[in-house]
Amino acid sequence: MKKILVVFALLLALPNFSQKQLNSLEIRLSLKKLNVLGSVLYIAAHPDDENTRLIAYMANETMVRTCYLSLTRGDGGQNLIGTEKGPLMGALRTQELLEARKIDGGEQLFTRAVDFGYSKTAEETFKKWGKKSVLADAVWAIRKFRPDVIITRFPSTSTGGHGHHTASAILAEEAFDLAGDPKAFPEQLDYTSVWQPKRLYLNTSTWWDKELPQKAKDNHGKYTTIDVGTYNTLLGKSYSEMASESRTMHKSQGFGSGKVRGSKLEYLELIKGKKGGNNDIFDGIDITWNKIKGGAKIEEMIIESNANFDGEHPEKIVPTLFKAYEIIDKLPDANQWKWIMLSKIRQVISACAGLFVEVTTNDYSAAIGSEIELTTRMVNRSSLKIELLEAKYGEKDTAINTTLTNNVAFSFKHNYTLPKHQKTNPYWLNHDFKGIYTVDSQDLIGNPQNRSENYVLFTFKINGNFFPVFRNVVNKHTDRVKGEIYRPFVVLPKVTANISDNVFIFSNNATKEIRVTLKAHEDSLIGAVEINLPKGWKSEPTSISYNLATKNEEKVVSFNVTPSANESVGEVKVILNDAEKTAKSLVTIEYNHIQTQTLLPEAKAKLVRLNVQIKGKNIGYIKGAGDEVPTALEQLGYTITLLDENSLKNSDLSQYDAIVAGIRTYNTNKYMINVYDKLMEYVKDGGNYVVQYNTNRGIDTKTMAPFPLKLSRNRVTVEEAKVTFLAPEHAIMNTPNKILASDFDNWVQERGLYFPNEWDENYTPILGWSDPNEEMVKGALLVANYGKGSFIYTGISFFRELPAGVPGAFKLFANIISYGR
């Protein structure tokens, strides 16, 4: 048996999280799906690129197995609901995709590619990712999922508008050809076998081709038209309505969608494979049990189960389903449909039998190697005879031998010792990375999240038939407002250490306090903590003892750090004297629309020693979306006051040396139109108003700036792009800090975005730059004097550069804030 078969069977057996209870209409739909053995793989670049209408239609109308392969996890995207960026953003958007798939019925896969931000060309994208590695992952996804049909979201030309988009189509087309070639990536064949999809389509759009509807009418076979607005009477909604619910899960991107009803056409253009007919992408492809030896008998039993299904007494068809189950279980292990259909039919049998099973803990976390108490609850809500024979915890079997009485809850407790090596952290974040994640095991590549290592295997007898049930260990508690809440159970180090900031800026030789919060994850922990500093940096004290008596107890320890005499950039790491040495931080991502995520990054922070001067002290800051700039400015010595609508309207703004509007302030705070006059009055009277980037959607800059300017979608994505000083003698380039070309070295992700492309003559453009082979963008930093004060607009990505501790960005921003002082 190939290694992957064992892994694949386990993956299908384990539910993602808490048990979903199917109602009779959902059981009916699941029964229908048992007789469909087809699959489609949808491929694009990012979370939110997927066509949720088409996924919902394929999964629930065509009823084929439907999966979305997102090349990235969306790490480079922006965040409208919080401050997560980079890897944390990727973890958040991964969960948003999984929540979307729960709604539309699809599955989810990824590659190891990192979303490094906007890219204008596929060539740049492949250079940063390493094309061969991501192509291997795409081939792996095809061989593992084994789709009959592949659909791409974007064309392989540049009309997709984003280098990642174009790259996703190029990779899909190449992977289509390579997945069936045993000479391509042969190392994968230790885990799976080659697979050749039958067709590849482009989910084309009238966005790119206005003549598409007529082309589709004139070229049957080349084009397939699908009405994704079709209404599903079992679900009580159309697929476009379902898709709106699914798409709304991309909340971090502000993708809340209104429900659309009525006919809605999608167009699929055949790119590779033989033409079909009948306006059906599966035309000529067998997606029935006839493709499986002995499958006709299974199909017959599923048809019989459908015919005899009684929504008020679903248990009546369980005997027939078990006959089908036994035949499926005897199929060869190498047949992928054995494992897929065993998982599906188990879910249907369990639902028809009214069997509820869960395994919970009182706490959401425990330390490695510790003993936890598990509570198992189950109930038989049918007239069937259901016997619980045993429960397997890890490698230990525990005999139970009890019969579950109809609608009588049964529960018991069991103590379980966690493995000493196991810690919860997203598997793709266990190592440092640049363009592509490092994953330790081939069979992990592509998985949306960690496989649970803590689960229980129960063996039941239902009407005399042996029946396995897997359940993940989860935490369950009751919130007085939200009610019953399930949370993933996580395994943590004995102690975690969180540093007070991600970046520490030393603008002179003065000592700064670095605080570390230690948290115990079991009782009675004694040890010592120290910090590892770069050469030339000093800490007092060098080591601090701790004594944490009880689980969840916290202790804050402080180190007084003196920087090196010269400008430098380095790192501080927390070191523990326990067996793990390098400490881990505890990071939680918690929103109502996703499962709470726990991450364990290394306990480290960036250290920056730079010579930077500031003028002015008091800064008013209007927060935008996911804005960490205020914290970074405090590192320079500014006093930051956060301003909202009330304080902008009613307080004396003259107390502020500058007022700064955070990213997307005008996109996210609709009240800004109401404070325009007050802000312009502040500027006229001598204030300095700085506005960071906003998107050009739905904004009238007449209510933002004193003179006309027009926002565009222009951006410079190459973070190393050469900078041109358009006004080298301007005060912003010289006071209080002399800005040099070297100050633009070592920037992250991009130079900036949504730069103005038109502006009034009262503005002075300060900087220019461009991506390769493009015209210079000159609207990155615009300064206008107005009355006694100044208005400054900048699309420079300070929201990325400052939290990343980029020295030159701090110097430039200090000059911007100091302008006119």
Image (cartoon, grey):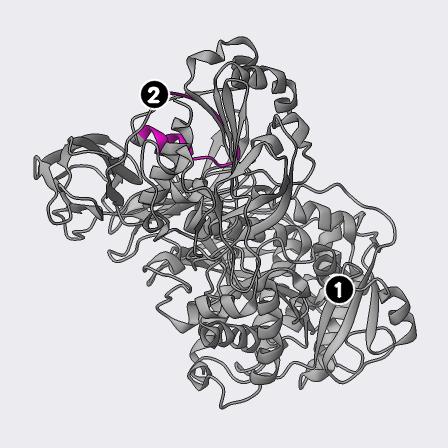
Q: Compare residues 432 and 281 and report the one nearer the observer.
A: 432
Residue 228 inside the magenta-drawn segment = no
Mark 1 or mark 2, earlier in chain: 1
Q: Mark 1 sits on what residue?
A: 32
Residue 635 occupies quadrant: top left
Residue at x 46% of width, y 12% of height: 654
- Where 77 sits versus 659, above or below? below
The spot of residue 118 in percent (x, y) is 54, 55
Which element is circle 2 on?
loop
Q: Compare residues 367 and 627 and report the one nearer the observer.
A: 627
Label 2 CA crowd tier, 10 Å (few <14, some 14–19, many 20+): some
Label 1 CA crowd tier, 10 Å (few <14, some 14–19, many 20+): some
Which region is colored magenta?
Answer: 617-634
Q: Mark 2 sits on what residue?
A: 617
Q: What is the three-letter code of the residue carrying label 1?
A: Lys
The spot of residue 218 in percent (x, y) is 92, 74
Residue at x 60% of width, y 56% of height: 385
